[in-house]
Image (cartoon, rainbow, N blue to C red):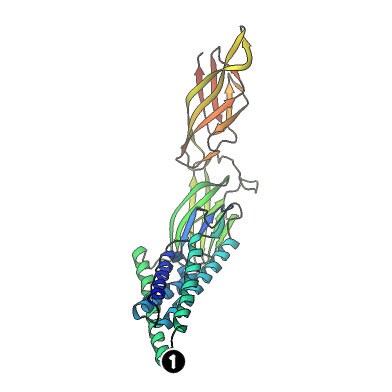
Amino acid sequence: MVSWKIRILHITLWFLCFLSYFMPWAGVGSGIFMPWINAGSEVFTGWDFVFPFSITYLIGLLLGLFAVVKQSKFLNIVSGVLMILGVVGAIIGIAQGAFVSDPYCDKMFGKWGLALASIASTIYTLTGIAMITSEKMPPERKHLKSALIYLIFAVVLAGAVVLLMDMGTEWGLSFALRSISIADRCGFPSVMISFDAKEYPIYFRLLTPDGAEIFHYHVASPRKVIYMPIEEQNKHRLLYRTNIVGPRKYLVEINLIYSGEILSREIEIKGARADIRVLNVRVERSSHLICNSISCPVISEVDVEVKNDGDVPLYFETLKLLLDGKEVPFYITKGRASLNPGESEILYLKPIEIPANEAHVIEILIPEVTSISYKFEP
């Protein structure tokens, strides 16, 4: 007779396997340090790896539930092995995703939920083996017949669960395009494509209006968002921290390899636009400029709020500060280096010491995008 303590432990392990299936198994992002716990820009649970990678894990979970209810020790082992195979399948899927990750800043990596599922399913299987070796096995033929019936039932139930989940989202759709926009990706203005997919692989291409390829992206495992960097016009090099000035057109081609269907979407952008507002001009006493035997008042900082009103990322690489029409050296002490469409940020500009004992016209300029003039009075 199996000890009740071992049985409770086994039920607890099954429940842990069940919970870990809906925890993060993989992520896509920078993931440079400690990728197992890195948040990443995209997160995938075990369920996201159902086809074709972790379907055996789902079957194993359902079979394990039958084993718990029927107290079948043989089914415990079968369900545990199936869950381990599901974990291995997910690892293969992550490896494929890592191989075709964004070469600029994306990486696909395993997360703590996958580690938990791996440990829990392994211990679950080992305790199942301990339970079956603790007493004599029932007659072999009857034993195998019952296991086969429950296995078939688990497979059918798993298929029904997957089908119901599909019906709950979008019946009959293997690919759904959510949105296409332009966003910053590690300094590269890029076409961001958000989508839902149930079958892979998918081949994305970014083209010029005349059909010349700018960039391509091959997706072989679960993804929700991809980025394709934009090329500088007529120069065949990718833009980096550069504002897109003026209207442009691009073509996105999506090849659903599993069905042979090819989708095309045209992108029209208006270019970079921005609104700049001076919030404050700070004045302090200079540490080395002397006026009439005392420290001179100087403009030590100019605080400006910048809002991206365009439909492309806004970069501050070319931001200029002019004093009475002449460019003044400065650096940004606080604030992001770029803004996506609709975002705003306060930038703290620290110029070289500018005497504040007389009036000045301060101009903030982003070439070919926008400018603002501010009259400073002492």
Badge 1, how many Cα within 10 Å: few under 14, some, many 20+? few
- Quarter of the image that includes the N terminus: bottom left
Rendered view: 211 above or below 13:
above
- Tell me what residue is drawn at x 55 percent, y 28 percent: 349
Dot 1 amino acid type: Glu
Residues 8 and 36: in front is 8
Q: Residue 52: in sight, yes or no?
A: no
Seen at 38% across and 85% down, the residue is: 149
165 in relation to 75, above or below: above
Residue drawn at (59%, 18%) of the image: 354
> Helix or strand or loop: what does disc 1 sit on?
helix
Q: Is residue 310 above or below residue 294?
A: below
Q: Is residue 267 above or below residue 374?
A: below
The quarter of the picture where residue 95 lies is bottom right
Residue 146 placement (x, y as % from top left): 38, 87
Query: Which percent across, then down, holds residue 162?
Result: 39, 70
Tell me, yes or no, if residue 183 can be seen here. Answer: yes
Q: How many marks?
A: 1
Q: Residue at x 40, y 80 (%)?
A: 2
- Viewer-nearest residue: 173 or 122: 122
Residue ID for mark 1:
140
Rendering coords of residue 30 (x, y %): 56, 52
Residue 182 picture location, percent across and down: 50, 47
- Quadrant of residue 13 in the image? bottom left
Q: Quadrant of residue 160?
A: bottom left
Between residues 222 and 150, which one lies in front from this camera angle?
Answer: 150
